[in-house]
Image (cartoon, rainbow, N blue to C red):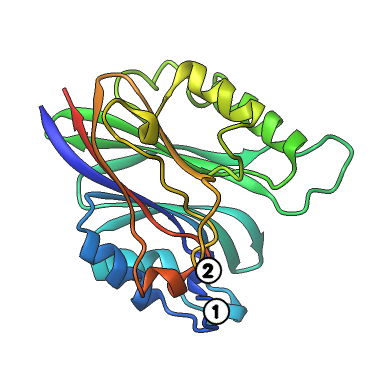
Amino acid sequence: MRTFRLLTWNVHRCLGIDGQISPRRIAEVIAAAKPDIVALQEVDVMRKRTGHVDQAEDIARALGMTSHFHNNLRVLEEQYGDAILTEWPSRLIHSDRLPGRPGFRTLEPRGALWAQIDLDGAPLNIINTHLSLIARERRLQTDCLMGPDWLGAAACEGATILLGDFNLVPRSRVYHRLTKHLQDVQRAPGMGRTQPTFPSGFPVLRIDHMFTRGPIRVKRVEVIRDTITRVASDHLPLVVDLEIG
């Protein structure tokens, strides 16, 4: 058995609710949590609005990790998307845009990236995503993630984790579809009361999720809510201790 810690967080381009843009503050929160693997959503790379900084690389460097990044939006050198960071050997398996409504201009392009991480010889699949605010698009995007390019791929066997900002609450149809095939870590046996993640100042919604499949046991779940995380982003980070065997 191997125990590891995983953190997922929508960092809101490192813009806090106090108006400060601070990748350093985000990195300090993550470092204090001591995760082995980090999944980030809403990351800016070389965007004018956040000072032409590669936030994924800067945060990874501060943590002593390597990063995999996928842009959901790109205009010239400016990019915006999601990232997976880890200190362990890893390789990017697949990254792509997720579908929007046919015939309609989407509010914001959405995507996902899938990295395979080597846990001392045991492969672990991590798929990080950020779904649409529009219910119909979320259904299409979930269909895609459940399909042959992602969770249904031949290479996506064994221990697998789908995580990120899903913009959906547990009473939704899409959530129930996901949990027919995957385990919601917050509802794993012995985890107690579920914890909301949004908005950070006064969290009432549980829209950031982590789902597992395969030989994975949930050991501990925590939503970090303190004086720093309440202002560092508009979401709170979700941290989970898992055991793979």
Label 1 sits on a secondary structure element that is helix
User: Against 146, is 103 above or below?
Assistant: below
State the mark number for residue 235.
none
Q: Please name whichever residue, 75 or 197, is drawn nearer the observer in this view of the structure.
A: 197
At label 2, which amino acid type do we have? Arg
Circle 1 or circle 2, nearest the eye: 2
User: Against 235, is 95 above or below?
Assistant: above
Q: Position of residue 82 (x, y in %)?
A: 50, 53
Q: Position of residue 228 (x, y in %)?
A: 36, 74
What is the quadrant of the N terminus in the image?
A: top left
Which residue is the site of mark 1? 50
What is the quadrant of the C terminus in the image?
A: top left
Task: Give whichever of discs 1 and 2 has the lower sequence position.
Answer: 2
- Contact flag, marks 1 and 2 (Cβ < 8 Å): yes
Residue at point 37%, 66% (across, down) = 57
Residue at point 52%, 75% (across, down) = 15
**Is disc 1 surrounded by few (<14), some (14 to 19) or many (20+) residues within 10 Å?**
some
Residue at point 34%, 68% (across, down) = 226
Q: Position of residue 195 (x, y in %)?
A: 41, 47
User: Against 74, is 13 above or below?
Assistant: below
**Is disc 2 surrounded by few (<14), some (14 to 19) or many (20+) residues within 10 Å?**
many
- Report the number of numbered marks: 2
Which residue is the site of mark 2? 13
Residue lying farthest to the right in this orientation: 103
Give the left or right position of residue 72, taking residue 113 as reference.
right
Which corner quadrant of the image does residue 213 belong to? top left
Label 2 sits on a secondary structure element that is helix
